[in-house]
Image (spheres, helix red, strand yellow):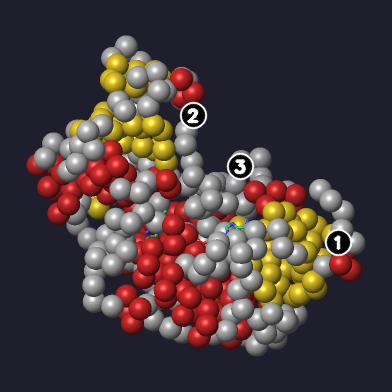
């Protein structure tokens, strides 16, 4: 860690790290509280363009296949989404976010990758690939896209086929003529299994049997799901994947996959072989591709010097919507745990802005 004198750093009250749904909602609410972007607070984002992680989503993720992109506060998405449901989410959402940043003049500094945040007593020092900042508080909104999760299995390094995470998936057609093993039991696994099985042979494996959820996922079910995740992070436990609390909705697409025999799920294999995978009982399967639809983890490595983590592996959260880090009230995490959804990020951005600004005596 190179030691810069604090006086070489740009002094601000607050830094918002990340300009996805969570960061933009936080910035909107800081501005609404009277703080001035570029003077009192700065939004830093490493991506080359607006759009948060949406700019990197695979091309077949369209507005008709996303769960739902909730409006950011103060400016609705509909006018940017248009009527064409087949428009790529990676086009429509960045277009919306870019217009949003301009509309509210949020002055996002990009590309700016924050590499480290450390405690320097009265201020937090933020090192980035562009400049140094000395701030009194942070709203971290760095999402999960930078941190794909692939569980380790013996033999992975010997596999002669292609092994990739959903993050790097581009199209089902790229697998034509190959046998694709889809690993994972979440919404992305199901969506990609549906697409790939229409092009080529697939096998589906999950650690536990899928928890199908018949019937609509109404507001009440949504609230219960968020409450379960919130309980975990308030106890300092790592947040679990979304589907662990919501279950898998049985949609018409699922019904048709059932009819096509695509959802005959196998349990997880025990190891990877040079030509495929092997189960405990010795059964083997040759595959050409292993597609890990095994989710993401929060991108928080740059906060490591702050030692926020508990022994349990999580971060104890507090505050009205569990955005404030109990160990360091100068740090808020938005888009983490219960706020890791577009609607959750919106609400949490408002709570974090209000709580941090009052903690720093910037508002009454
Ligand atoms: P992101 O959108 O990931 O934004 C984080 C930002 O932080 C990025 O711009 C990144 O460049 C920046 N960043 C990261 N690290 C650094 C760093 N070190 N320095 C500087 N900048 C950094 N949720 C829904 O509500 N509806 C959906 O339909 C939906 N579909 C999804 C589909 C997929 C494939 C995935 C993976 C997730 C989906 N989600 C959906 C969840 C979605 O991630 C959240 O809802 C929400 O969009 C996350 O917003 P965010 O601002 O927390 O993170």
Nearer the N terminus, badge 2 or badge 3?
A: 2
Badge number at residue 286: none
- Quarter of image, res 129: bottom right
- Distance CA(mark 2)–CA(mark 3): 18 Å
Nearer the N terminus, badge 2 or badge 1?
A: 1
**Mark 3 secondary-structure assignment:** loop
How many C-alpha atoms fall within 10 Å of the one at disc 1: few (<14), some, or many (≥20)?
few
- Quarter of image, res 221: bottom left
Are the two marked residues, 2 and 3, in contact with CB atoms closer than 8 angstroms? no
**Mark 1 secondary-structure assignment:** loop
Residue under numbered circle 3? 313
Q: Position of residue 5 (x, y in %)?
A: 90, 61
How many C-alpha atoms fall within 10 Å of the one at disc 3: few (<14), some, or many (≥20)?
few
Residue under numbered circle 1? 121
- Between 139 and 48, the one nearer to me in the picture: 48
In this view, the residue farthest toward the left is 259
Residue under the image location 49 percent in, 53 percent down = 145
**Mark 2 secondary-structure assignment:** loop
Nearer the N terminus, badge 1 or badge 3?
A: 1
Q: Position of residue 222 (x, y in %)?
A: 35, 62
- Distance CA(mark 1)–CA(mark 3): 25 Å
Give the left or right position of residue 333, taking residue 80 as reference.
Answer: right
- Between 187 and 209, the one nearer to me in the picture: 187
Badge number at residue 152: 2
- Between 238 and 71, the one nearer to me in the picture: 71
């Amino acid at each position: 860690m190179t030691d810069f004198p604090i006086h070489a750093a740009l002094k601000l009250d607050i830094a918002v790290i990340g300009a996805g749904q969570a960061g933009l909602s936080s910035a909107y609410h800081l501005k609404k509280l009277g703080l001035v972007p570029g003077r009192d607070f700065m939004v830093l984002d490493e991506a080359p363009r607006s759009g948060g992680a949406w700019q990197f989503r695979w091309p077949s993720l369209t507005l008709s296949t996303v769960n739902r992109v909730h409006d950011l506060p103060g400016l609705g998405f509909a006018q940017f989404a248009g009527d064409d449901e087949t428009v790529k989410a990676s086009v429509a959402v960045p277009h919306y976010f870019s217009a949003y940043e301009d509309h509210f003049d949020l002055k996002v500094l990009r590309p700016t990758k924050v590499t480290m945040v450390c405690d320097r007593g009265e201020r937090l020092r933020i090192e980035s690939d562009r400049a140094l900042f000395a701030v009194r508080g942070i709203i971290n909104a760095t999402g999960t896209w930078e941190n794909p999760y692939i569980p380790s299995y013996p033999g992975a390094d010997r596999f002669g086929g292609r092994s990739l995470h959903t993050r790097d998936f581009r199209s089902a057609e790229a697998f034509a003529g190959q046998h694709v093993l889809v690993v994972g039991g979440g919404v992305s696994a199901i969506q990609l299994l549906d697409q790939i099985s229409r092009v080529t042979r697939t096998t589906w494996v999950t650690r536990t049997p899928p928890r199908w959820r018949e019937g609509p996922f109404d507001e009440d079910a949504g609230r219960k799901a968020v409450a379960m995740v919130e309980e975990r992070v308030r106890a300092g436990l790592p947040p679990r994947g979304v589907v662990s609390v919501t279950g898998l909705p049985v949609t018409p697409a699922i019904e048709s996959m059932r009819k096509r025999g695509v959802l005959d799920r196998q349990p997880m294999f025990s190891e990877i072989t040079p030509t495929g995978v092997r189960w405990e009982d010795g059964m083997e399967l040759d595959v050409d591709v292993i597609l890990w639809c095994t989710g993401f983890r929060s991108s928080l490595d740059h906060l490591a010097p702050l030692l926020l983590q508990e022994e349990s592996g999580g971060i104890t959260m507090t505050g009205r919507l569990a955005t404030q880090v109990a160990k360091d009230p100068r740090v808020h995490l938005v888009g983490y745990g219960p706020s890791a959804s577009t609607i959750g990020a919106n609400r949490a951005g408002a709570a974090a802005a209000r709580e941090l600004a009052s903690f720093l005596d910037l508002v009454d």
